[in-house]
């Protein structure tokens, strides 16, 4: 037995190097003798040579394992009969099929990376995606090796009364030494990343679901006993999701039980382990008093997302991690559709696009830009990105637009039936859509292989004599790392034409004999430039393009304020009404930023105030849409529109615009606030959420008037609130105002909620994103607060993450204090939890887009990180790509 040195530099893995596995596994039987300080894992693998492999030796992955013994077909191997490195185990001589028995020891207590088996509060749990299983036992830890698992858990019966694993419960018993055991069997072959176990003393809430073929499924949610009253919403969401996937995709659940467990320490949102989803407690627990509407909303969508993975991810899984978007992009699309169906489709689309533009467009324009199907990585954990998830969802969404809902369903049916039980690629997915619709999607597939956000340039010319509108669409895509040139994409452009009174005009191309029978049609741009000629137009139409955001592109279309204001009022597409408003705001605010920079008076055009006034006063618009139309683009998003981002100018302008709107529309805000501020029993539904969101937008503007009366109103709302949405909205506003009331509100909030982790995280966040000059000082003080632990990812995200991402004026302070702070924290975190450390680097993503002094300061901080000893592969990869 020999342990070689770890490679000096982290290694690159490439898609082109993919080879089928040399050995396959039919069945796995695992036995865990669980204990927090030391757990003994005995594994029995029935392995055989893969006829499609390369004939190489049998190599297993394994990291941080203490090896106790290895036996091949019952015979213990001597040290010279196998070879070990820090992360592999190689068996030079094995028969064509054999049984391998390995015993290892692992140490959950010492596991702060939260990958593999770890200890969270009073729970022992696992996280195996993407490559955590190799921290549990030696195994070919790759998704294209699928096996049937039987798992026996043994633990102290008092300390760990509940013992859970994937599949169905098979048997259980007591032992004489006070331990007990439970055996689980999962009949569905699965890759190791979907393995899970949980041990704990937990409260369990149960329910039932009858599937479309009449089978009874037991539903269980396991939480810390103190959270017993926070399970209803997740359980309801689960039942909604199960029914929805049957109705919309024809997918039925396939085990006797479906379990969800909430844990406090978790690197991501949640994990779709077969039959045993493990959730970050923040993404599953909710009660009206402790969770906001946004929390309820997110929980519904994440519960849906993980459940939907049972088909898109588990029954059909990924061949290798380059195919990650195969399951994530598709599953995000599915959860977005689900949320749209359960709530408001227009609001869902607006919020999804808002997130895509602010996060994914920035990623696609920065040093970590990568295709939806990347072609290389150093650390796969770094590729759980908004590009893989959100852009991936847009790409699948375009396939749906191109095939129509029925064609798309035919395609997904074929995909699921053709590939059930297999590990496949994004090409296989597209092939199924092609075959079911007799389509050629060769060019479309560039969306998977080319990074960067395409720019769609739109020009419209109307010829009154000929009654023709010429619409020219052109596309280009900026260079991204490793991809200097791009080929044209297939871009579906949903569009419509409006008359001056806002009516839809006929959509007939010069090549057609009649107009389409619809107010929106999809033009498909496949060339670099194409011109579409619309005929029989008796007046000059107003063009509405990219309705519903039909493709993930940046639109360049010169339109004056009047045209945007017109679309904001009259577009037939709610998404485009909101979008026209945002474009109008951006156009105006960017001009004001220039005025600010050259010390000119800030000019806020009347037309904007007038439009917003109409929106606010229009009772026919869904209040949720009104709330969003009245919300200003974020400072980060405005910054992303500038060649050199000027954080201070943006901050000042945004604040000024907010105050001006507040002053001018004060009466309207007042009226609507009062009308919406009705006492009602909290319910999670689209209509109540809409009311609360508009009410709190109104309160925000009223507070911006600076009128002390409004502060009293805000305090009153906090005092009377019976739900976290109204309470937290009030607190946020109070925290941006200096003075004793601010401190009092913060103290009172903490005193009331200190026992509740989810609420304490909100308390950390409001302070981290505060506008007042002492933000960084407070954040640093809070690092030492008893409520904060560097080992808890939610704490880190709530405090450090929120400060660095959502407090741009203070993070980008001219003296570099924000940058130095982040660099220090990242180096501390990297020793504990490399995944979380690497994520926090994201705050430096756009560092080259700031002025020279700030660039120099950020570069210095990045170089300090890059130069540190023993960096994890996670941080190493990102920091070096940023500096490249
Ligand atoms: N697969 C999970 C999801 O998106 C995300 C995840 C990745 C969780 C890696 C943990 C670790 O549903
Ligand atoms: Zn997912």
Image: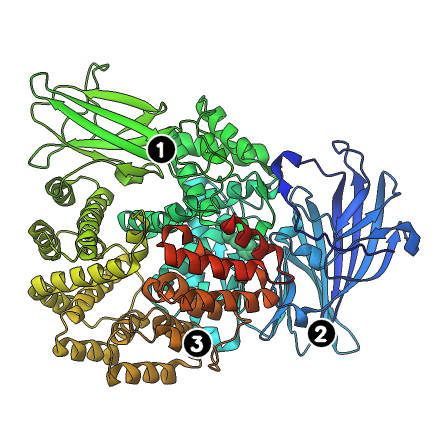
- Give 319 or 821, whichever is nearer the viewer: 821
The reply to whether discs 3 and 1 touch (Cβ–Cβ < 8 Å) is: no
**Residue 635 quadrant:** bottom left
Q: Tell me if residue 290 can be seen.
A: no
The reply to whether discs 1 and 2 touch (Cβ–Cβ < 8 Å) is: no
**Residue 766 quadrant:** bottom left
In the rendered image, the quadrant that contains the N terminus is: bottom right
Give the CA separation, mark 3 to mark 2. Answer: 32 Å
323 versus 585 height, above or below: above
* Residue linked to disc 3: 780
Give the percent coordinates (x, y) of residue 658.
Answer: 17, 62
Q: Tell me if residue 132 can be seen.
A: yes
Q: Counting other residues with Cα less than 10 Å from the Cα at mark 1, is it few (<14), some (14-19), or many (20 or more)?
A: some
711 versus 520 height, above or below: below
Q: Counting other residues with Cα less than 10 Å from the Cα at mark 3, is it few (<14), some (14-19), or many (20 or more)?
A: some
Q: Is mark 3 within 8 Å of ligand 1?
A: no
- Label number found at residue 845: none
Q: Counting other residues with Cα less than 10 Å from the Cα at mark 2, is it few (<14), some (14-19), or many (20 or more)?
A: few
Would you say 464 lies left or right of 279 here? left
* Residue linked to disc 1: 401
Give the percent coordinates (x, y) of residue 286.
Answer: 40, 68
Q: Look at 47% across and 47% down and name the residue there.
A: 367
Would you say 644 lies left or right of 232 here? left
Q: Look at 64% across and 63% down and name the residue there.
A: 869
Give the CA separation, mark 3 to mark 1. Answer: 48 Å
Question: Upstream in the sequence, badge 3 or badge 2?
Answer: 2
* Secondary element at image label 1: helix
Q: Look at 37% across and 50% down and name the residue there.
A: 849
* Residue linked to disc 2: 37
The reply to whether discs 3 and 2 touch (Cβ–Cβ < 8 Å) is: no
- Give 257 or 394, whichever is nearer the viewer: 394
């Amino acid at each position: 037995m020999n342990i070689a040195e770890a490679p000096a530099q982290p290694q690159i893995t490439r898609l082109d190097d993919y080879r089928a596995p040399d050995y396959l596994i039919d069945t796995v039987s695992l036995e865990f003798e669980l204990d927090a300080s030391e757990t003994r894992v005995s594994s029995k693998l029935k392995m055989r040579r893969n006829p499609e492999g390369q004939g190489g030796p049998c190599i297993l992955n394994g990291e941080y394992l203490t090896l106790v013994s290895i036996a091949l077909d019952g015979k213990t191997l001597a040290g010279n009969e196998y070879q070990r490195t820090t992360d592999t185990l190689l068996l030079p001589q094995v028969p064509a099929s054999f049984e391998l028995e390995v015993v290892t020891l692992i140490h959950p207590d010492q596991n702060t990376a939260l990958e593999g088996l770890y200890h969270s509060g009073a729970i022992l749990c696992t996280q195996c995606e993407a490559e955590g299983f190799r921290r549990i036992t030696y195994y070919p830890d790759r998704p294209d090796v699928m096996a049937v698992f039987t798992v026996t858990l043994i633990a102290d019966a008092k300390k760990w009364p509940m013992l859970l694993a994937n599949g169905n419960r098979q048997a259980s018993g007591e032992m004489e030494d006070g331990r007990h055991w439970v055996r689980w069997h999962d009949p569905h072959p699965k890759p190791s990343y979907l393995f899970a176990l949980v041990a704990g003393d937990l409260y369990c809430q149960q329910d039932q679901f009858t599937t479309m073929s009449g089978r009874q499924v037991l539903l269980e949610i396991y939480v810390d006993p103190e959270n017993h009253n926070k399970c209803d919403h997740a359980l309801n969401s689960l039942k909604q999701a199960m029914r929805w996937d049957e109705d919309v995709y024809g997918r039925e659940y396939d085990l006797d039980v479906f379990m969800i467990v909430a844990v406090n320490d978790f690197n991501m949102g949640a994990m779709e382990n077969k039959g045993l989803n493990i959730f970050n407690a923040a993404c599953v627990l909710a009660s009206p008093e402790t969770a906001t509407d946004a929390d309820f909303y997110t929980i519904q969508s994440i519960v849906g997302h993980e459940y939907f993975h049972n088909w898109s991810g588990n029954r059909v899984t990924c061949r290798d991690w380059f195919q990650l978007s195969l399951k994530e992009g598709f599953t995000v699309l599915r959860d977005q559709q689900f949320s749209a169906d359960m709530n408001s489709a227009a609001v869902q689309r607006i919020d999804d696009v808002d997130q895509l533009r602010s996060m994914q467009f920035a990623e696609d324009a920065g040093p970590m830009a990568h295709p939806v199907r990347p072609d290389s990585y150093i650390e796969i954990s770094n590729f759980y990105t908004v590009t893989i998830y959100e852009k991936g969802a847009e790409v699948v969404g375009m396939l749906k637009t191109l095939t129509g809902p029925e064609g798309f369903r035919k395609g997904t049916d074929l995909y699921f039936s053709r590939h059930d039980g297999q590990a496949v690629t994004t090409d296989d997915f597209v092939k199924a859509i092609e075959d079911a619709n007799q389509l050629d999607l060769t060019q479309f597939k560039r969306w998977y292989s080319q990074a960067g956000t395409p720019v769609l340039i739109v020009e419209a010319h109307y010829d009154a004599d000929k009654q023709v509108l010429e619409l020219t669409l052109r596309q280009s895509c900026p260079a991204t790392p490793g991809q200097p040139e791009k080929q044209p994409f297939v871009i579906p452009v949903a569009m419509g034409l409006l008359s001056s009174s806002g009516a839809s005009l006929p959509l007939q191309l010069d090549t057609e004999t009649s107009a389409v029978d619809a107010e929106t049609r999809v033009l498909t741009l496949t060339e670099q430039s194409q011109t579409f000629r619309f005929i029989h137009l008796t007046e000059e139409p107003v063009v509405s393009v990219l309705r519903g955001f039909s493709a993930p592109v940046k639109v360049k279309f010169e339109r004056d304020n009047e045209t945007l204001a017109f679309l904001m009022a009259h577009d037939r597409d709610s998404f485009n009404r909101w979008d026209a408003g945002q474009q109008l705001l951006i156009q105006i605010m960017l001009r004001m930023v220039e005025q600010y920079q050259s010390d000119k008076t800030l000019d806020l055009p009347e037309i904007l105030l007038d439009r917003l006034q109409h929106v606010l006063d229009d009772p026919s618009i869904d209040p949720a849409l009104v709330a969003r139309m009245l919300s200003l683009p974020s400072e980060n998003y405005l910054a992303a529109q500038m060649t050199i981002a000027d954080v201070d100018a943006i901050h000042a302008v945004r604040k000024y615009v907010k105050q001006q709107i507040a002053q001018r529309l004060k009466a309207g805000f007042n009226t609507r606030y009062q009308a919406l501020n009705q006492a009602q029993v909290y319910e999670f539904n689209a209509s109540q959420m809409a009311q609360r969101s508009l009410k709190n937008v109104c309160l925000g503007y009223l507070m911006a008037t600076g009128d002390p009366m409004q502060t009293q109103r805000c305090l009153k709302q906090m005092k009377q609130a019976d739900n976290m949405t109204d309470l937290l909205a009030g607190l946020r506003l109070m925290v941006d105002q200096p003075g004793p009331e601010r401190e009092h509100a913060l103290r009172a909030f903490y005193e009331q909620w200190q026992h509740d982790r989810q609420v304490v995280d909100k308390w950390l966040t409001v302070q981290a994103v505060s506008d007042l000059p002492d933000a960084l000082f407070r954040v640093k003080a809070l690092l030492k607060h008893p409520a904060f632990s560097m080992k808890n990812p939610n704490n880190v995200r709530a405090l450090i993450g929120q400060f660095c991402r959502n407090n741009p004026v203070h993070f980008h302070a001219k003296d570099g204090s924000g940058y130095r702070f982040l660099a220090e924290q990242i180096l501390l975190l990297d020793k504990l939890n490399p995944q979380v450390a690497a994520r926090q680097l994201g705050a430096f993503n756009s560092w080259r887009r700031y002025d020279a002094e700030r660039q120099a300061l950020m570069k210095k901080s990045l170089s300090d990180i890059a130069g540190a000893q023993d960096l994890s592969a996670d941080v190493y990869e990102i920091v070096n790509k940023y500096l490249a």
